[in-house]
Amino acid sequence: MRLHQLLLITSCLVLMSPLFGSCLPLQPSAEPRLVFLERFSRPGVGFNWRNVSCPLCKAVFTILDIALLSDANEERVARAVGEACIRLHLAEEQVCRQITELFRDDFIRALEQSLLWPTEACALLLGPSCGKFDMYAPWNLTLPKIPKPPVTPPSPPKPGSPQSRVLFLTDIHWDKEYEVGSTADCKDPLCCRKDSGSPSWRRREAGYWGTYSKCDLPLRTVENLLENAARTGPWDWVYWTGDIPAHNVWSQTRTQQLSELTVISRLIHKHLGPNVTVYPAVGNHESTPVNSFPPPFVHGNRSSAWLYDAMAEEWAPWLPQQALKTLRYGGFYTVELQPGLRLVSLNMNFCARENFWLMVNSTDPANQLQWLVQILQTSEDKGEKVHIIGHIPPGLCLGSWSWNYYHIVNRYESTITGQFFGHTHLDEFQMFYDEQTMTRPLGVAFIAPSVTTYVNLNPGYRVYYVDGNYKGSSRLVLDHETYILNLTEANHSPEAPRSPVQNPKWTLLYRATEAYGLSSLFPSEYNGLMRTFISDDRIFQKFWYFRHKGHVSEACKETCKTTILCFLRSGRYDDLEQCDHLNGFGGNLARAARTTVC
């Protein structure tokens, strides 16, 4: 193989992996072969990076390091990446060229600053058998020396006690280019768009309210959801955990991202009204390039100031000045919701493997976790309870970040009474156990379903019922409901099947306590539900149906069920890996869980 061909392949693998590792669609399926998909072995992607041998990888990275010492070679590397993407059929030619140009400058700057050695780069690409990736080596936070208070198991509230009703929105993914009648089965990573073309014979077309395919949503569906939410209020407050733009990550600009941030923020404010406070978190799709969130030590045009400043401006009606200050600094903040209840909104992009800026330094970026510890200690001292919101679930984060977060939840288990995330687009949860025995449940990370249909889903949203505002309240989640828009019904009016319903109804898919026979959603109840999933497959299959927002065609059996149970039990990434290896999956489960999210 010629030298320029080696450079083509490896450059493409490094540069394209942040994109295709997190943003290409996977069809929800019960088949094990789809559960254990590798990073590039998925529909429309015809290359497996594991075909590259370890010696070959190291040789090419040595050449790449030398090549990047010259500014002229940066242009050559960028062209090589675009050509490799095309030749390896990773995407259509236009997508390859646009994504290369979009990612080029930021990625090369991060790669140069990371001092990435060939053995480390190849360990990242090929696994630990090809080297050691010290860049993500273990690190530990410093916790206060104050002893952990005795743990008192929570008690259910007395009948008639106040409850807080909380609307939860995540992963809206509004597609400005959505077009009814366009093809839903295009070759690009995102379809149902103006440039997707018209469907040929036997190919599906985009529906009026949304489509069961790798498509995002038209604005009318988002607005219809907000109108419905306004009618079904009142809400005590709203959690909104990010991902506003569509999945056309190869063609996004800062101007477009900011425009969509403005439109959706103001729509939420318009429909929910000035008396409802919304508490947002930053998603991985808010930036462009996607997943690119430089830590605060990166200044100038490559910093995230362009995004955080706009967020602070749009969200100023909801957040106090001190919260806006830390939002501008690092995309995270804290605020008092009610007397005795505090919220922390984390920027989970600082834990994401796909954020290539973490190659420079992945040790507690922005000192966010150390800041979290200070907030929690102050709340413990004051007797406050704390809710945490974020986009990416902690069990899918970089191993060391995830381990430290898990350690924090263990130390402050009596203070942290709710954890709320999105990102996977599915209706899931992840358990937290005491670190000594890993048997006593002490926390649940709730993962709510997406507003978007991407991929093959109904649009949906979540409602949480939380122990309310009274003295001695646990502030724990007591119940939750999931609402969906059934696209089969909404896109086909009973009177005229070829026409959509003009004012479709969002219907209750399920209420958790009723569906699963639980008295509350305390960690102990969820731990019991996990045991029920093992012993009663009928209940597990019900969960599998709800997990996909009521649109799934196959049951989840055997290997599929084992992988799901591993995921649900794994509130930290190394637990997911351990479950993976104990069940003989050889690392494939952890890799699939990390890379099959949007």
Image: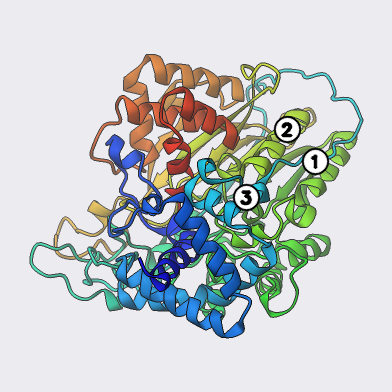
- From where the camera sits, is residue 499 visible? yes
- Vertical order, 490 against 437 (above or below): below
Q: x and y percent of residue 241 in the render?
A: 58, 54
- The residue where tag 1 is placed is 141
Q: Element under label 2? A: helix
Instruction: Name the residue beneath numbered marker 2.
Output: 407
Asked whether 459 or 212 is in front, the reply is 212
Q: Which mark is residue 390?
A: 3
Depth-wise, is mark 2 or mark 1 nearer the camera? 1
Depicted 320 relative to depicted 591: above or below: below
The reply to whether discs 2 and 3 touch (Cβ–Cβ < 8 Å) is no
Task: Tell me the kind of residue under disc 3.
Answer: Gly
Residue pushed farthest top? 535
Side of 411 relative to 61 (left or right): right
Name the quadrant of the C terminus.
Answer: bottom left
Residue appearing at x 56%, y 85% in the figure? 72
Quick check: can you spot residue 241? no
Q: Which residue is nearer to you in this view: 182 or 1?
A: 1
Q: State the residue at coordinates (67%, 75%).
A: 302
Disc 2 residue type?
His
Earlier in the chain: of badge 2 and badge 3, it is: 3
Q: Quadrant of residue 471?
A: top right
Which of the two labelled residues, at mark 2 and mark 1, occupies the earlier sequence position?
1
Disc 2/disc 3 C-alpha distance (Å): 17 Å
Dot 1: element: loop
The image quadrant of residue 374 is: top right
Q: Residue at x 55, y 71 (%)?
A: 288
Secondary element at tag 3: loop
